[in-house]
Image: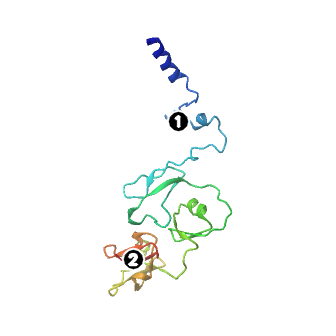
């Protein structure tokens, strides 16, 4: 009985059919697992699938991007998932509007650029105004605006006062006076909290 247990143990430890050699840093050698080292077999073939994009969330590994579910764009600290950054995308024309406000040829193109999808179709080009104070690089003093208006940002300096709903945004931090206004992602415009 004891001999049988020892033999079974040795077969399990030494007789595995799949070779899993370790490389010096202790990581599993993917070539040993797949039985080859062809160009298509890279460590980025499978994404980590980690949750990302939330306060205190994980950072994606090299070669990955954090992608939010379509239409969410990280609103309300909603998380995304780390996926492998696409290398070559198909030449398919199916425009999408990225959460960064850029129109991409298709979903793959957006993900290759590191952008999540805000909606299908091209992004609106309705002359939206930037009010993102993070873009100000000049030393001018921010203008005082009437109630319901905020200072716009033009050419990295303060611009004229505009109604808050004229301010474009792709994330909450792009809106001024965060204690009063937030980004309404479905319209990509700043506005009061609802």
Quarter of the rendering containing residue 180: bottom left
- Check the image and name the residue furthest to the front: 1
Q: Look at the picture and state if 6 lies above or below 35.
A: above
Task: Sort mark 2 into few (<14), some (14-19) or many (20+) by Cα contacts within 10 Å.
Answer: few
Q: Residue at x 52, y 20 (%)?
A: 11
Quarter of the rendering containing residue 41: top right
Colouring mode (rainbow / by chain / secondary structure / one colour): rainbow
Image marks 1 and 2: residues in contact by CB distance under 8 Å: no
Location of mark 2 (residue): 139
Location of mark 1 (residue): 28
Task: Sort mark 1 into few (<14), some (14-19) or many (20+) by Cα contacts within 10 Å.
Answer: some
Q: Is residue 90 left or right of residue 15?
A: right
Element on which disc 2 rests: loop
- Check the image and name the residue furthest to the bottom: 146
Q: Look at the picture and state if 8 lies above or below 180.
A: above
Q: Residue at x 61, y 70 (%)?
A: 95
Q: CA distance from mark 1 to mark 2?
A: 53 Å
Q: Nearer the viewer, residue 132 or 98?
A: 98
Q: Look at the picture and state if 3 lies above or below 54.
A: above
Element on which disc 1 rests: loop
Q: Nearer the viewer, residue 90 or 42?
A: 90
**Number of marks in the rendered image:** 2
- Check the image and name the residue furthest to the right: 91
Please tell me the numbered disc located at residue 141: none
User: Which quarter shows the N terminus?
Assistant: top left
User: Which quarter shows the C terminus?
Assistant: bottom left
Q: Residue at x 43, y 64 (%)?
A: 74
* Residue 69 picture location, percent across and down: 48, 61
* Residue 48 picture location, percent across and down: 50, 48
Badge 1 or badge 2: first in the primary sequence: 1
Q: Which mark is nearer the camera, 1 or 2? A: 1
* Residue 172 picture location, percent across and down: 40, 70
């Amino acid at each position: 009985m004891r001999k049988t247990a020892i033999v079974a143990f040795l077969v399990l430890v030494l007789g595995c059919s799949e070779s899993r050699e370790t490389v010096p840093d202790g990581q599993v050698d993917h070539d040993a697992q797949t039985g080859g080292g062809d160009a298509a077999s890279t460590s980025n073939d499978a994404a980590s699938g980690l949750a990302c994009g939330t306060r205190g969330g994980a950072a994606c590994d090299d070669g990955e991007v954090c992608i939010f579910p379509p239409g969410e764009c990280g609103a309300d600290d909603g998380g995304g998932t780390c996926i492998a950054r696409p290398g070559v995308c198909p030449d398919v024309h199916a425009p999408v509007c990225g959460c960064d406000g850029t129109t991409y040829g298709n979903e793959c193109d957006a993900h290759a650029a590191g952008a999540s999808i805000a909606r299908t179709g091209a992004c609106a080009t309705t002359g939206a105004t930037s009010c993102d104070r993070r873009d100000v690089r000049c030393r001018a003093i921010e203008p005082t605006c009437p109630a319901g208006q905020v200072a716009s940002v033009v050419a990295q300096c303060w611009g004229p006062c505009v109604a808050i709903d004229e301010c474009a945004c792709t994330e909450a931090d792009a809106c001024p006076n965060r204690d009063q206004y937030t980004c309404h992602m479905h319209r990509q415009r700043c506005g009061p909290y609802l």
